[in-house]
Amino acid sequence: MGEDSAPLRAPAGTHDVLWPESARWERLVAEFARRAQLAGFGLVVSPMFEDAQLFRRGIGDDSDVVRKEMYEFSDRGGRQVALRPEGTASVVRAFVQHHPPVPWRAWYVTPAFRYERPQAGRYKQHHQLGAEVLGTDDPDVDVEVVALAADFYEWLGLRHVDLAVNSMGCTECRPAYLAALVAYLEEHHLELCDEHRERYRANPLRVLDCKRPECRAVTEGAPRITDYLDEACAAHLARVRAGLDALGIEHRLEPRLVRGLDYYTRTTFEFSATSLTAAQNAIGGGGRYDGLVEAIGGPPTPGIGFGIGIERLLLACDAEGVFPVDPRLPDAFVIDVTGGTVARDLCAELRRAGLETVRAYDGRSLKAQLKQADRSGARVALIVGPEELAGDVVTARPLLEAGPQVSVPRSSVVEWVRASATEDTGDDR
Ligand code: HAM
C-alpha cells in the first residue's frame, strides 16, 4: 500500500468519542444544561477561533497557555487567529460586543485547544462545560457558581473530590503581595526549577503554580496571599467561605492556588479528583476576573465562572466506578422476511410514536435477522413472515426474558409495544 492510501488516524492528543461512550457525553451535557438553566444560565455558542489578540489580552501574554500552548496561525487572508484554548475569553468578548443586560449568565460546552504534550488526561483538544456570570461582584454569586459545579460532581456520583479555594486579591492589594513574593523568591531563586530560576520575576505567581518538586519545596515557605488581602478582599473571601459552609460544600483554603490563567482576581477555586494521578487530576476550576471585561475593551464589569474538563471528569468517574455507560435498549427490533416493506413502514410508525426501533436490512435470512435482533439489546422482536403478512399480524417475541410469543394485529402494534415498554421499564411514554 502506498503512503497516499495508508489509513489516516486522528492527530495525536485528539480522540474520537464513539457510541456507546458518547451516550455518557449526551447525558452529561443534558444534565449540566438542566442544572445551568435552573440557576438562570442560558447557552452561548461562539466561534471556535478568534483574533489571537483576544487570548493574549485576556489570558495573559505570560501564561503557559498563551506562551507555549496556543494554536495560533495566520489565515489565508493574513489575519492572526487562534483556536480557542478556553471558553471564558470568548464569552467575555461576546458580552462586550453585544452588551446584554447584566447580570448576564452564560453556560457553554466547547472544544478547547492547547498544544500540550499528550498523556492520560491531557489532550491537544479537550472539551469543557463552563458557566460565567458577568456584571456583579456579589460574593453570593461566587457561592452559586461553585455550587453549580460541586452539585454536578455529586450528581455524577463522585465522592473523592477535593475543592481548594483561594483569593487572588485585587489591583489594590496584590502589588504588596507580589513585592513580598519576589523578595522571597529572590532569596531562594537558585533552588527553583530551571524555567523559574530564569523567569520568576516576569510572573512570580507562576512559581506558585509550578508542579515541579524544586518549586513546590521553595513555595512551601513563601509568603501567603491570604495574609496580604485588603479588608474588602478578605471580607469577600470570608463571605464566600461562609456561603460554601452553609450549603454543605466542603472545601479547604489553599493560599498557593493561583491557577494558570492571568485574569483572576479575588476568588479562585479548583476541583481535583483524588482518584486520579496528581498531574492531571484537575477536573474543573475557575474564579473571579473583575478586570477582564475592561482588558478586552468593555466597561468595568466584574465576572466569575468555571470550566470543567469533560474527559478528565469521565476518567474520574471510571476511577471511582460511577456514572457507567448505560446499555441502550431499543424498544423493538423489526424482522421482515417478506421483502422489507412492512419493516420500512412499521419502523417509521413506531419511531413517530416515540418508540426506539431498529431493524435489519439487505433482505437477510430469518436466522441472520434474529441474531442481529439479539445483539441489538432490543426488548422485543417484531417478526413478519409470509404467514403474518397474509394474516395482517406481527409476531412479537420477547428477547430479554423468557415469555410467550404473541400474535399482534398489525394495526395495534404501536399500542402493544408501548404498553409492553411501560410494563418493563415503568417509563410513561
Ligand atoms: P482551566 O483550569 O485551564 O480553566 O481548564 C478547565 C478544566 O479543563 C481543567 O480543570 C481540566 O479539567 C480541563 N483541561 C484543561 N486543559 C486540559 C487538557 N489539555 N486536556 C484535558 N483537559 C484539560 C479554564 O479554562 C478557565 N476558562 C475556567 C474559567 C471559567 N475560569 C473562569 N471562568
Image (spheres, rainbow, N blue to C red):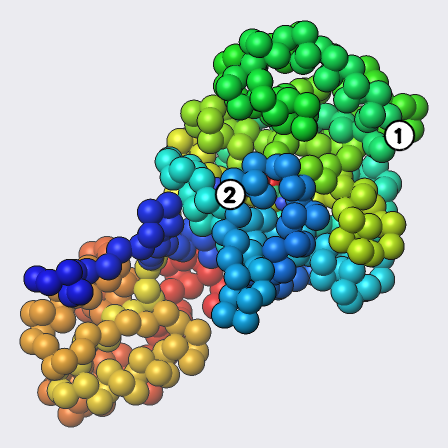
Q: Where 351 falls versus 291 (above or below)?
A: below
* Image location of residue 91, percent across then percent down: 69, 56
Q: Quadrant of residue 370?
A: bottom left
Residue at the image position 55 percent from the left and 67 percent from the top = 78
Left/right placement of residue 411 relative to residue 388 reads: right
Q: Earlier in the sequence, mark 1 or mark 2?
A: 2
- Residue 286 visible in the snapshot: no
Residue at the image position 23 percent from the left and 87 percent from the top = 342
Q: Which mark is residue 172?
A: 1
Numbered disc 1: secondary structure = loop
Q: Amino acid at mark 1?
A: Glu
Q: Which mark is residue 69?
A: 2
Residue at the image position 85 percent from the left and 42 percent from the top = 137
Left/right placement of residue 18 relative to residue 278 reads: left
Q: Which of the pair 54/44 is nearer the observer?
A: 54
Is ligand 1 within 8 Å of the beta carbon of the residue shown at mark 1? no
Pointer 1 local density, CA inside 10 Å: few below 14, some 14–19, many at least 20: few
